[in-house]
Image: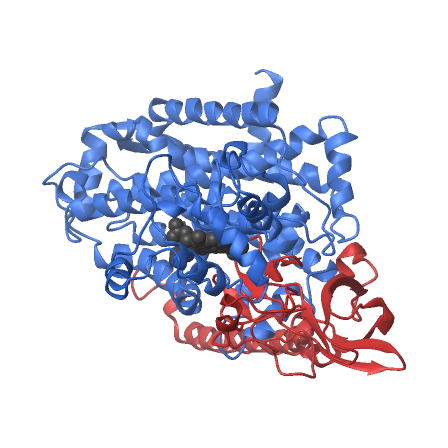
Chain colours: A red, B blue
């Protein structure tokens, strides 16, 4: 600044500048408007996976009931109902089907309720064990030990024309059930321990396991 | 004038870069900072560039599609000349970068480099550390194998614990209902565009501030940082006892960078690339997922937390830790810089380092995971079967058959989830063994429903033989008193 003679200080100039700053501000405002108009729909694009949440679940056919022997827990695979064509093998989902009688089925997600690792079924000891942090579950899916807070996740299911259908479609986490239908978990109540007292006495007749 | 000089002048006349660049290069730095301690920042930068270059080269081939990513890594490993080496450089470069960035951070903290006027340099540095870790995690996802798949599952399960919006967050993170093609493309975009873009921009700013504010001087006990006088003191220091950064101080950075690059290349050539492990097919459930080295500590923490503390811990501790790191220069922005006068700071660094080391070490052999194949793969040591009754031997069979070995060692083989059973009869009576087997407890499942009475008896009889030779079997003193009173023999009861 070089004193009053500075051309910038002349009155006309000052008026001109304030007019131009106003124009600049309007220009910025215009850009903000245009940007908002363009960006708002794009938010829907980014949030798409959340907005589509309702469409994920569907009924999946696990095959004929005769595939599942009574008293056993069987590992099955199904194709996820909601896929992209470039999913490859990742759209195949494993699940455990437990059949306790002609009509009683439970279908468990393989994902451990702790952090989602795949649990493995051991029919000899009637336990599901998780390879990650050592969670273990009983045959009915209830928590046996380790870090999980609850039992295994289950799918809603129905029997139709001799087939087993489950309601599936999303990875189960604490707030996303594996599917709709049943209560989130059949056996999440850890306080119900298997009957043991009677078993200490040699019980006459049978030595078969009671579970499974 | 030689031709290259002419070209240079022609360009310089138009670019006008010489002034600012020269100024930045020859700016004086305090003499004592021309030290080997000050080389980690530049080494981090060199590693970042290495990651960018090797990353671009890998992206020429990598297919970010869930159906093909794994195959393209196999092609890189086995079919393209030196593809394996580039993958190895990128993988080892990542490990080195995380390590060097962490060392850089500790060094800056211990030298008081976060204090006035460099608070914001530190804050940006914290953000850059988080981005580096973000790159390490997303990079592990792009190596789309079983570890990546189930690692994503763990990430999703953690996100699913956020109150109220957990479900939505999981879908946002996975890009759909589950881990699939949409998930991989998301993480590809993060790993290749979003995080590196931000990281490079932040690096630029970080460097700008380092040049403008000057390198942190070597801390001296008693030389106190005051907001009013620091700038002048620093200026005097650099101008009375300073060196031109180029060439008098920079040679150590150059030597160290070369050594680091050589180390990365040596590791890459010797150890080769990381994975990919098994194909990312979720129906292969015979898998033991494990995170990469830098997340092993987290893996350990997650297995040792009590179940009801886990969600609060996962959701509250990381934000607090980050807030704490960012708050450091604002809480302790002035005063002593020297580590001789900052015992708490020194203790904190070493405490964290020791915890991290211990957790990581545990994470390398995961004593909390059952070994899924031990029941069929780890036999009962022969010497435990010598001179045993048929019933006891039958018990050894039950022990194997019922997967006890998945969690329990015998003769150094088997899982480590529970205690080794070699000497169990030395401290547990028969009754206690029955109780433990049938009711479980303390992270052991109850076997009451999975064992027949005959199996239980045989099993416990075998367990009672498991003690060190000549040592007495465990006994229950109260039982002896009670039995003496009633006149029954202590052992005949069952």
Q: Does residue B248 lie above or below B472 as drawn?
A: above
Q: Nearer the viewer, residue B323 or A160?
A: A160
x and y percent of residue A26 in the render?
Answer: 55, 78
Identified at 31% across, 47% down, the residue is B352
B104 horizontally vs A171: left or right? left
* Place of residue B151 in the rendered image (x, y in percent of width and height, measured from the top left): 59, 54
Asked if residue A79 is positioned above or below residue B292 in the image, the reply reads below
Q: Is residue B172 left or right of residue B337?
A: right
> Left or right: B470 with respect to A200?
left
Q: Quadrant of the N terminus of chain A?
A: bottom left
Residue B455 percent location from the top left of the image: 58, 56
Q: Position of residue A136 (x, y in %)?
A: 55, 61
A54 lies left or right of B221: right
Q: Is residue B74 above or below residue B456?
A: above
Q: Among all residues in the image, which is located at the extreme front?
A: B487
Residue B127 vs residue B481, the one in the foreground: B481
- Nearest the camera: B180 or B264? B180
- The part of the image, by quadrant, that contains residue B113 is top left
In the picture as drawn, the residue positioned furthest to the left comes out as B222
Q: Is residue A99 visible?
A: yes
Residue lying at the far top of the rendered structure:
B2
| Residue at figure coordinates x 48%, y 61% from the top left | A146
Q: Nearer the viewer, residue B379 or B183?
A: B379
Residue at (46%, 48%) from the top-left corner? B463
Q: Tell me, yes or no, if residue B130 can be seen here.
A: no
């Amino acid at each position: 600044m070089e004193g009053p003679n500075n051309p910038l200080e002349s009155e006309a100039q000052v008026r001109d500048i304030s007019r131009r700053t106003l124009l600049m501000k309007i220009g910025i405002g215009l850009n903000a408007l245009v940007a908002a108009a363009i960006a708002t729909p794009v938010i829907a694009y980014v949030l798409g996976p959340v907005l589509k949440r309702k469409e994920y679940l569907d009924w999946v056919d696990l095959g004929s009931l005769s595939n599942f022997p009574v008293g056993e827990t069987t590992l099955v695979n199904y194709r996820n109902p909601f896929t992209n064509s470039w999913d490859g093998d990742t759209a195949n989902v494993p699940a455990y089907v437990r059949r306790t009688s002609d009509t009683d089925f439970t279908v468990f997600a393989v994902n451990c309720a702790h952090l989602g690792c795949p649990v493995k079924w051991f029919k000899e000891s009637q336990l599901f064990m998780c390879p990650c942090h050592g969670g273990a579950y009983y045959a009915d899916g209830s928590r046996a030990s380790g870090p999980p807070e609850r039992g295994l996740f289950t799918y809603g299911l129905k029997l139709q024309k001799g087939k087993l259908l489950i309601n599936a479609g999303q990875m189960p986490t604490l707030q996303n059930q594996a599917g709709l239908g049943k209560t989130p978990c059949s056996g999440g109540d850890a306080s119900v321990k298997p009957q043991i007292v009677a078993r200490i006495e040699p019980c006459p007749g049978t030595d078969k396991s009671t579970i499974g | 004038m030689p031709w290259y000089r002419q070209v240079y002048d022609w360009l310089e006349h138009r670019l006008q870069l010489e002034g600012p660049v020269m100024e930045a290069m020859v700016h004086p730095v305090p003499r004592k900072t021309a030290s080997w301690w000050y080389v980690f920042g530049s080494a981090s930068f060199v590693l970042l560039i290495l990651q960018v270059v090797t990353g671009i080269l890998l992206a020429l081939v990598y297919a970010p599609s869930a159906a093909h990513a794994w195959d393209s890594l196999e092609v890189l490993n086995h079919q393209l000349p030196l593809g394996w080496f580039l993958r190895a450089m990128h993988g080892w470069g990542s490990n080195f970068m995380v390590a060097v960035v962490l060392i850089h951070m500790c060094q800056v903290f211990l030298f008081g480099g976060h204090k006035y006027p460099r608070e914001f340099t530190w804050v940006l540095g914290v953000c850059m550390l988080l981005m580096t870790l973000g790159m390490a995690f997303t990079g592990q996802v792009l190596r789309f194998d079983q570890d990546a798949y189930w690692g994503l599952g763990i990430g999703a399960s953690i996100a699913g614990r956020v109150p109220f919006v957990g479900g939505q967050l999981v879908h946002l993170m996975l890009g759909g209902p589950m881990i699939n093609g949409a998930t991989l493309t998301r993480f590809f975009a993060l790993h290749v565009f979003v995080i590196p873009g931000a990281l490079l921009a932040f690096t630029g700013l970080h460097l700008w501030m380092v040049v403008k504010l000057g390198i942190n001087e070597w801390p001296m006990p008693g030389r106190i940082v005051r907001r009013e006088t620091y700038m002048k003191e620093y200026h005097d220091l650099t101008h009375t006892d300073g060196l031109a950064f180029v060439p008098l101080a920079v040679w150590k950075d150059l030597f160290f960078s070369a050594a680091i690059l050589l180390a990365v290349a040596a590791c890459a050539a010797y150890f080769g690339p990381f994975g990919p492990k098994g194909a990312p097919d979720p129906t292969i459930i015979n898998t033991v997922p494990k995170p990469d080295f830098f997340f092993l500590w987290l893996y350990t923490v997650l297995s040792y937390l009590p179940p009801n503390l886990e969600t609060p811990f996962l959701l509250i501790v990381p934000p607090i830790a980050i807030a704490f790191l960012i708050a450091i220069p604002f809480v302790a922005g002035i005063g002593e810089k020297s580590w001789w006068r900052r015992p708490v700071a020194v203790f904190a660094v070493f405490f964290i380092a020791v915890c991290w080391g211990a957790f990581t070490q545990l994470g390398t052999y995961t004593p909390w995971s059952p070994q899924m194949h031990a029941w069929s793969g780890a036999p009962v040591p022969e010497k435990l079967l010598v001179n045993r009754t048929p019933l006891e031997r039958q018990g050894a069979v039950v022990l194997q058959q019922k997967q006890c070995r998945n969690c329990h060692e015998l003769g150094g083989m088997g899982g480590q989830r529970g205690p080794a059973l070699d000497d169990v009869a030395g401290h547990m009576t028969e009754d206690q063994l029955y109780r433990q087997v049938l009711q479980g407890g303390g992270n052991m499942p109850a076997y009451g429903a999975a064992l027949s009475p005959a199996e239980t008896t045989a099993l416990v009889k075998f367990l009672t033989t498991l003690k060190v030779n000549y040592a007495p079997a465990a006994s229950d003193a109260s039982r002896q008193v009670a039995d003496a009173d009633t006149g029954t023999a202590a052992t005949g009861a069952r």
